[in-house]
Image (cartoon, helix red, strand yellow):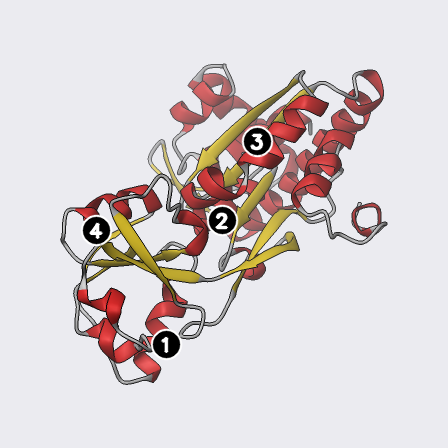
Amino acid sequence: MNIKQLRCIHEIVRHDFNASRAAEALHTTQPAVSAQVRQLETELGVRIFERNGKRLTGLTEPGVRVLELARRVLEEVEDIRRVGADFRAEDEGTLVIATTHTQARYALPETIRAFRTRYPKVKLRIRQGAPTDLCRWVQEGEADFAIATEAIPHAPGLSMLPCYRWNRCLVAPHGHPLLEVHPLTLEAIADHSLITYDFAFAGRSVVEQAFAQAGLYPEVVLTALDSDVLKHYVALGLGVGILAKMAYDPENDRDLAARDLSHLFPDSTTHLGYRRGRYLRGYMREFIRLFVPHLPEGVLDDGQ
């Protein structure tokens, strides 16, 4: 048994049991990957994959357990490499942050600026997606941190750090009648077409629950993951928008006006998640401290 065999199993599953795509990811050939799998199956005396002819279709019962342990071994091997890199070149490396558009556009810039000043040799990559995608990327080792709201606290295998609390605002073109309604109520908002985040985006379920609890089911005419896209369609007059308050800037969004909605919806908390038990390099811990300055001393060291 060797690491190469375990990597082959992991990549085959990660690429939906397509051995050719797994081979591409491993920079080798499909016959070489298949040979590694057969050798491991022979050594273990069990079949790891279900097959339909030559095509792999799924994992056998022992294969599920083998994959679980293989992932654990690969994670430990990666952590060993990180320890070496930390002592060899502590200010060099790569940091992949998986996050939503709103976090990348409005919450992260100052942290990124400060981090780049401190670690100019670290290559930063921001990978955007829906919260469920972010968690999966971290779980599978494709990203170091996930920064989002609702999905992270429930993601298995991730350690979660609360970062900050936020709420929502209503945005509408200047002169819109809702801007003059006092007090602004859910009933008044529900009389208008809504533009808000896609169901996969953290925060929309909070909005839906608040309306449903009031017995209201407003018409949602457009959804998206991108706050700037939402504001664009609000400005076109398609409806009024409900979005994160941080995403409205009176200087940049001069064609829109905003009303605070914190009296109508509960606060949400943005979390930073990373794989539980993972070795965090020094610059990774520093990034967390910059983004979560209120983090108590020793929390990250305790989580190593």
Query: Which numbered disc flags the more N-terminal residue, 3 or 2?
Result: 2
Where does residue 223 sit, x and y in percent of width and height?
25, 53
The residue beneath circle 4 is 234
Q: Position of residue 168 (x, y in %)?
A: 41, 61
The quarter of the image holding the C terminus is top right
User: Label 3's element?
Assistant: strand
Could you classify mark 2 by the number of other residues whose Cα lies within 10 Å: few (under 14), some (14-19), or many (20 or more)?
A: some
**Label 3 crowd (10 A; few <14 / some 14-19 / many >=20):** some
Dots 3, 2 in contact, CB < 8 A: no
- Per the image, label 4 sits on a secondary structure element best described as helix
- Which residue position holds label 1? 210
Give the Cα separation between the discs numbered 1 and 4: 22 Å
Q: Is residue 287 above or below residue 193?
A: above
User: Does label 1 or label 3 sit earlier along the sequence?
Assistant: 3
At which x and y percent is residue 78? 70, 30
Mark in front: 3 vs 2: 3
The three-letter code of the residue at mark 4 reads Val
Label 3 belongs to which residue?
96
Q: Residue flagged by tag 2: what amino acid is it?
A: Thr
